[in-house]
Amino acid sequence: MTSLSRTRTRPPLSSSNLTSTSGHNRRRSPSISVDFRQWDSTNKSPTATTTPPPTPSLSPSLSPLARYVLDSFRRNSNKWCPAVLSDLTKLRRVTASLLTEIIRVSSFTSSHNHQLPLTELFHWAGKQKGYSHTYAAYNALAYHLNRVGRFRAADQVLELMQSQGKPPTEMQFEILIRFHTDAGRGLRVYHIYDKMRRKFGIKPRVYLFNRIIDVLIRTRNLELGLRVYEDFRKDGLKEDGVTFMIIAKGLCKEGKVDQVFEILGRMRSECCKPDVFAYTAMVKVLVGEGYLDGCLRIWEEMERDGVMPDAMAYTTVITGLCHAGRVDDGFRLFREMKKKNGLLVDRASYGALVDGFVKLGKIGRGCEILNEMVKDGYRPDLGIYDSLIRGMCDVERVDKADKLFRVVIQEGLLPGFDTVCPILMAYVKMEEMDPIVGMVRRMHDLGLPALDHLVKFFTVLVVDGLEQQVVKAVQVFRSLKEKGYCSVFIYNILIESLHRIGKINMALSLFKEMNHSQHFKPNSSTLSIIISCFVNNDNVKEACSCYGTMKEMSWIPSVSAYRALVKGLCRIEEINLAITLVKDCLGNIENGPIEFKYCLAILHAAKSGSAAKILSIINEMIEEQGHPPDDIIYCSVIHGFCKKSDPEEATKVFEDLRKRAMLPESRLVMYEDMLKKHLMSMTAGLVLSGLKLFDLESKLKLTDKLRS
């Protein structure tokens, strides 16, 4: 029996009660006495033999008893065990305030990897005689469960309170709603709300109603939010301005402008007139969701209501209209905004208009906005210059774009890739190499990452995969390489693009050039691409040589390289090497090709010697994965049954696939011939192994000499 089960009344906690006995004939307790009021986990006194090691993570503001309990958990690897129970029984009682303190501090100090067993402590404390949890303890437990990701268990604290005679109040529901709101769990909020009304009969206040409706609308649950709003009105509560605005913004998010007008009418008659901030909030939501017609209707309603739009409202609408291509409407509002005194035109409005006109091909109008912006005392940012440069290059006025680029430099702005890329692309289109080299030299002189920009530029240049663009990219590369602007990454981009369009010889020429270079040696990406090039060029031997080089360098080929090399080995009937490569790929790459996985499945199934089992695996691959059998699948069938010395079963598989029109007659003949050769090769290998085993290999060589 522990001290908690004793029925006698104990005196108040004092050092004399803990460290001494009241009589000489009373047997001393075997447990070591501790003065918990003076407990300090950092105490290293040699007399306190049971004092735990220091715990620097504990706050010095904790009470001594809380520090004692937490340190007991630490000494026992944060587990609920008999040793912890033994330490707890040394206390007279774990009070509700002490339990709350422990849970609160543990929620902040413990990580997800080192969680204390606080739920076990909570339930153990509740079993103490005469003990009753307080609301603060329940709240602390709910907070802890939510913090460690057990939010469903936190919701069950409400039922726990009800069962233990502490019916939850609105405060407990508000805490859980706040947790779910912060995490964006709208449906969970509605679940708590429904439980609050239906199961516990508690009606929220206006503030809590607003919070519930707001999170439901923000998480795209408008119908549930309107259902809660109906309960709000049934309860006879009076809406405030916040309630009306939450509903209005939710309707704006779904584009229901007619219902928004109804809400605004009720807001005027029952509460207050919407102000400029309310209208701006609705306009911002409509613009963000792309409902521009509804946005203009709200704008007209604001003017009819006598509300003067502020600079934020104008900027929001102008920016939204320009981004949607309705630049004329945005420009009209821009002129209206400038006529009103006291409104400061935001730079974003100028930038949106310039970008909008450029996208419409009206470069002159965009330049006019830029000049007007400068006259108004604004300094254009780099984004505005980038838009104009891009527009000028699109209309083949690269000379104007180059002049604007010089203006950017004079303004002290640092050009980025979006600034130089349109100019470089325009020069490529004009097939002028010298200006391209000059632009790259200027980038280098300005301290820009020229090579990084060139890598991005070549990526953009070949992104469409057009043969003409790739050939131009190679020409540009040659011109830049002569001036020293080159990198391995650019080589890889060009080699991969050439391989993609079927220019294998050009890709191999670049690879050969890299091998003879002193500064641009091939890396793993280069060799992975070149393996596919060699296989496509029917040079599997060189592809295997590249693979061997990668293995020597401890590089892992790409999935496409593995696939190409396996396909090439199957084509030249090197089935053993192909199977070895399949296993190597799956061992090095986590999500390897699906056909490789089915290859191993077929090899394993072939041990049973059943053609039906192999056909079921192939059918699964076709029906469930949508992947028809390829060379490695057929080769795995050949290898598996030859290893089992049962070639007839492999023939059954091929015949079945031929009858289902999945294997042409010509390929059937090819695979049957490959089956015979592979069986003879494996048989010869077994014979030689037997000769070596019985030391008959020398006699075989002697016989061959006599015959010759």
Image (spheres, rainbow, N blue to C red):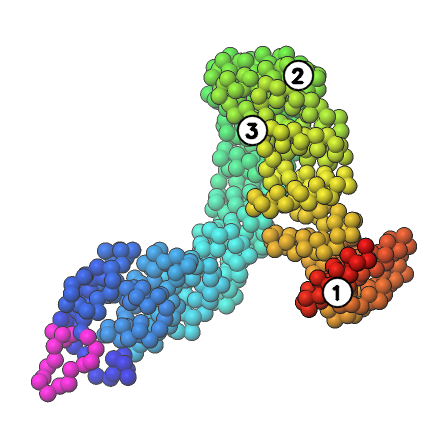
Look at label 2 and name its amino acid: Met
Residue 447: x, y in percent? 48, 21
**Alpha carbon of mark 1 to alpha carbon of mark 2: how far?**
66 Å
* Residue under label 1: 687
Q: Secondary structure at mark 1?
A: helix
Mark 1 and mark 2 in contact? Answer it, CB < 8 Å: no
- Number of residues whose C-alpha sits closer than 10 Å to that of mark 3, classed few (under 14), some (14–19) or many (20 or more): few
Residue 501, above or below 605: above
Please give the residue where the numbered disc 3 appears in the rendered image: 519
Mark 1–mark 3 distance (CA, rounded to whole Å): 51 Å
Which is nearer the eye, 47 or 666? 666
Residue 18, magenta (yes or no)? yes
Q: Residue at x 12, y 77 (%)?
A: 20
Give, as a three-letter code, the residue at label 1: Val
Q: Nearer the viewer, residue 116 or 351?
A: 116
Q: Which sits earlier in the primary sequence, circle 2 or circle 3?
A: 2
Image: magenta residue range: 16-32
Q: Residue at x 61, y 52 (%)?
A: 589
Q: Amino acid at mark 3?
A: His
What residue did someone put label 2 on? Answer: 433
Q: CA distance from mark 2 to mark 3?
A: 24 Å
Picture layout, residue 238 above or below residue 424: below
Q: SS class of the residue under badge 3?
A: loop
Give the left or right position of residue 172, taking residue 398 as reference. left
Q: Is residue 123 above or below residue 578?
A: below
Q: Main secondary structure of the magenta part?
A: loop
Q: From the image, state whether disc 2 or disc 3 is nearer to you.
A: 3
User: Callout 2: few (<14), some (14-19), or many (20+) C-alpha neighbours within 10 Å?
Assistant: some
At x 24% / y 84%, what residue is drawn? 7
> Is residue 351 visible to the viewer in this orientation of the structure?
no
Which residue is at the far bottom? Answer: 25
